[in-house]
Image: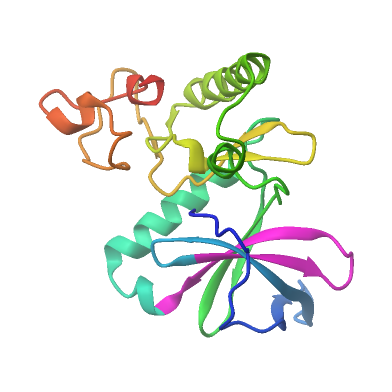
Amino acid sequence: FKMPTDRKDPTEQEILIEEKKTKPNGEVYVRKYIKGRFLGKGGFAKCYEFTCTETKQPYAAKLLPKSSLTKSRARQKLLSEIKIHRSLKHKHVVGFQHFFEDHDNVYILLELCTNQTLNEIIRRRKRLHELEVQCYVVQMVSALKYLHAHKVIHRDLKLGNLFVNDKMEIKIGDFGLATKLEFEGDRKRTICGTPNYIAPEILEGKNGHSYEVDIW
């Protein structure tokens, strides 16, 4: 996501979002969330801070309008993102809570990282101390070892997808371009990524790509 400097969306007002659940006995249960500040956007998705009115738990909520999911490929891409992200549980991966939908949108509730991203931190401070970088690299390597051990390739690692929590710990997020290898030696051939960050193996495309694109 691209994080705005003022973190406000003047076109949006604080409203309640309802999540309807059906219990095993058929009873419909409604959970409500306060739609708060605007956090960022990327592609068709926008991200807001949601707070559950029942538990007061804050989340980062990714909103995708259903109008952007009319094509089968877009729906499959979203389902793949949800399937991969919800399977991951690691200290340095943004936590996946759950997802739901209403008439207009699909909502993905994620762990809220209050210090935005490394992109925003560097934009404000211009540079990081060497010790900070060492700590962040160790955390990133730990997360990547976990992802690759579970046959997941992120394919879009960049400063804007390295989120920072209130303890100034790195959390890898945004699995919109992630993929999972089906077998040992599997190679992917989809050309994807962010300009200036795309690995040569993805651009060349001759022999496909694997975990090495995350190292790049």
Q: Quadrant of residue 204?
A: top left
> In this picture, which residue range is highlighted in magenta?
46-66
- Residue 22, visible in the rendered structure: no
Q: Give how far across and how far down residue 97 sits, in percent.
A: 69, 53
Q: Give how far across and how far down residue 206 sits, in percent.
A: 10, 26
Total of numbered circles in the picture? 0
Q: Give how far across and how far down residue 71 sits, in percent.
A: 28, 70
Depth check, front residue: 14 or 106: 14
Rendered position, 120 above or below 74: above
Identify the residue at horizontal 44%, vertical 26% (top origin): 151
Q: Quadrant of residue 79?
A: bottom left
Task: Kindly give the residue lying farthest to the left in the view shown.
Answer: 206
Depth check, front residue: 64 or 113: 113
Identify the residue at horizontal 33%, vertical 33% (top origin): 197
Rendered position, 13 above or below 131: below
Depth check, front residue: 176 or 86: 176
Rendered position, 204 above or below 166: above
Q: Give how far across and how far down residue 17 sits, in percent.
A: 69, 80
- Residue 23, visible in the rendered structure: yes
User: If the image is split into quadrants, where does the C terminus sit?
Assistant: top left
Depth check, front residue: 84 or 177: 177
Q: Is residue 137 magenta?
A: no
Q: Is residue 3 left or right of residue 77?
A: right
Q: Is residue 68 left or right of residue 82?
A: left
Q: Is residue 73 left or right of residue 207?
A: right
